[in-house]
Amino acid sequence: MYNLSCYNPSSFILMGIPGLEKFHIWIGIPFCIIYAVAIVGNCILLYLIAVEHSLHEPMFFFLSMLATTDLVLSTATVPKLLSNLWLGSQEITFSGCLTQMFFLHFSFVVDSAILLVMAFDRYVAICFPLRYTAILTPQVIIKLVVSIVVRSFSVILPDVFLLKRLPFCRTRIIPHTYCEHIGVARLSSADISINIWYGFAVPLMTVISDVIFIAISYTLILRAVFHLSSQGARQKALSTCGSHVCVILMFYTPAFFSILAHRFGHSVPRNMLILLANLYVAVPPALNPVVYGVKTKQIQDKFILLFSLKKT
């Protein structure tokens, strides 16, 4: 019975932000605001893209995918964070922990892949404008979407089984606000070298390769832009990429900073690392629709039209 409970623990305890317990209520307020902005902003973005026929283009279809994935990413972590900080609800079931871990990592890898596809979309639009509709046909878009989902599902699902095989007899207290693969694996007294190596290989195979291909895409885009003879054409081409570049920087910069701080920032207090880890899953989903609303004229015009009609 003891061994059985080790391999099938009923629950874990999420400690929240150790050392900042007396500030939990105040810390929850900005995260609640950020989450509300993410929900409202991404839902408005999805609504505008769905109802406006002028936005039924590949770029906006990929943007709607990004908005949907952002909703999953923030919803996988922030509600549990708020219940922990405000209600003291620290317990999470073993199956709930695995589910949260899966959707957290899955949505992050999907987000990265969508940003790569959006970079490819901008590359085709700027470098091959006359062949844009011929290259990005509905069939090609469907294949890209299926490949994104299949790739992300295939590389993240093994994390669940790698955790299920481990015994958790020593402790079930997670010094964090959410469940993530290596953090949960470290609670086990068994050998977790496979988990560590797989956890290292997945970002290398997916996120790092996405960043490399995004960099290649924008190198080719910049080369094509600076070969344009018209100054106005250059500015127009660069402005179409501006919002996407901002979103790329907002997504990867805090994520890589948080990962590097966890790996090498041994002098950084644990509570600061936990706050960073929460910010990188909460802030980009909230800012993405704001950036696209400000930087993309079509969305900005439709947004103004929507609210002017409501006021009328």
Image (tube, helix red, strand yellow):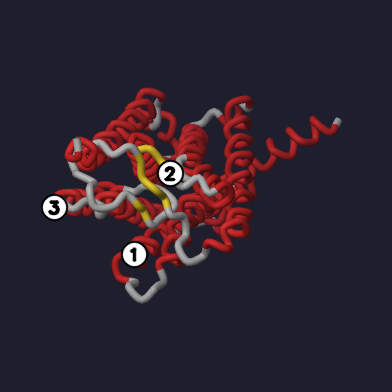
For image coordinates 84% across by 33% down, the residue present is 311
Q: Amino acid at mark 3?
A: Asp
Residue carrying label 2: 91
SS at mark 3?
loop
Q: Amino acid at mark 2?
A: Glu
Q: Earlier in the sequence, mark 1 or mark 3?
A: 3
Q: Are marks 3 and 2 in contact (CB under 8 Å)?
A: no
Residue carrying label 1: 262
In front: label 1 or label 3: 3
For image coordinates 41% across by 50% down, the residue present is 14
Does residue 267 show up?
yes
Residue 167 x %, y % = 19, 44
For image coordinates 51% across by 48% down, the residue present is 84
Q: Horizontal placement of 54 versus 4: left or right? A: right
Residue 106 x %, y % = 35, 40
Give the vertical position of 44 relative to 284 (above or below). Answer: above
User: Label for residue 11?
Assistant: none
Q: Horizontal placement of 180 versus 3: left or right? A: right
In front: label 1 or label 2: 2
